[in-house]
Amino acid sequence: MNLTATILAITAKLLSGATMRWVDCQPDVCQRVYFANHTSHLDALVLWSSLPGRVRDVTRPVAAKDYWDKGFVRKHIARSFNALLIDRNKIKVHKSPVDLMIGEMGEKFSLIVFPEGGRSAGDEVGEFKSGLYYLSKKRPDLELVPVYIDNLNRVLPRGEFLPVPLLSCITVGAPIWLESGESKNEFLKRARTAVLQLREI
């Protein structure tokens, strides 16, 4: 891990005060897709920073290019934590974000994704977009690991620039997979429920 990434990981942990709980799941370097609720621009960075180092080295957050590709600082941060930037304004059928993610994962990397597609307000968890379903359909070998991030929206509220140091909690649940014959809607509903259930633990 480079120096900037090390500094980012330490800073993110200090600002968020994040504690990580693994529930029916253990840290592992096998290929996974961590899918989480999304309430703050810091979600990807804090979740990535909270992973054990050996897991973090092979895990890439998927982030919005229109936010992380602006200005030198954001670009540098995104490069430092090896973010995979998705251009949400230029999505095409023959060049889908799912194909891009699968190509960038190869046989080594795991991903952090936010299936809501954008940040939700407060503690609400919005409906999931279809990307997680197609990802699991094209790579059924991947472990799909639900994650609930609590209180991070108050560390960097919508519209604010400077983060406020607070305590947050990240809960990681048991992996799920796409089941045989399961429809897109059934799977997305089950995946969202898996995240919501972690909020109650």
Image (cartoon, helix red, strand yellow):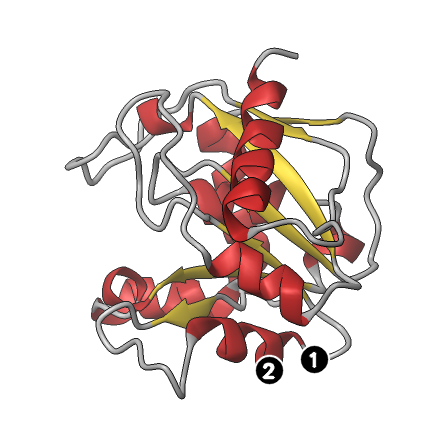
Instruction: Give the residue number, with chain letter if any, for mark 2.
Output: 103
Give the quadrant of the N terminus.
Answer: bottom right
Category of crowding for the residue at label 1, using alpha-carbon neighbours closer than 10 angstroms: few (below 14), some (14–19), many (at least 20): few
- Distance between the Cα atoms at labels 1 and 2? 6 Å
Residue type pointed to by label 2: Gly
Give the quadrant of the C terminus.
Answer: top right
Tag 1 secondary structure: loop
Regarding residue 18, the answer to whether it shows in the image is no
Instruction: Give the residue number, with chain letter if any, for mark 1.
Output: 106
Regarding residue 163, the answer to whether it shows in the image is yes
Tag 2 secondary structure: helix
Residue 131 x/y as whole percent: 48, 60
Establish if 161 lies above or below 59.
above
Name of the residue lying farthest toward the top: 200
Tell me what residue is drawn at x 43 percent, y 73 percent: 97
Residue type pointed to by label 1: Gly
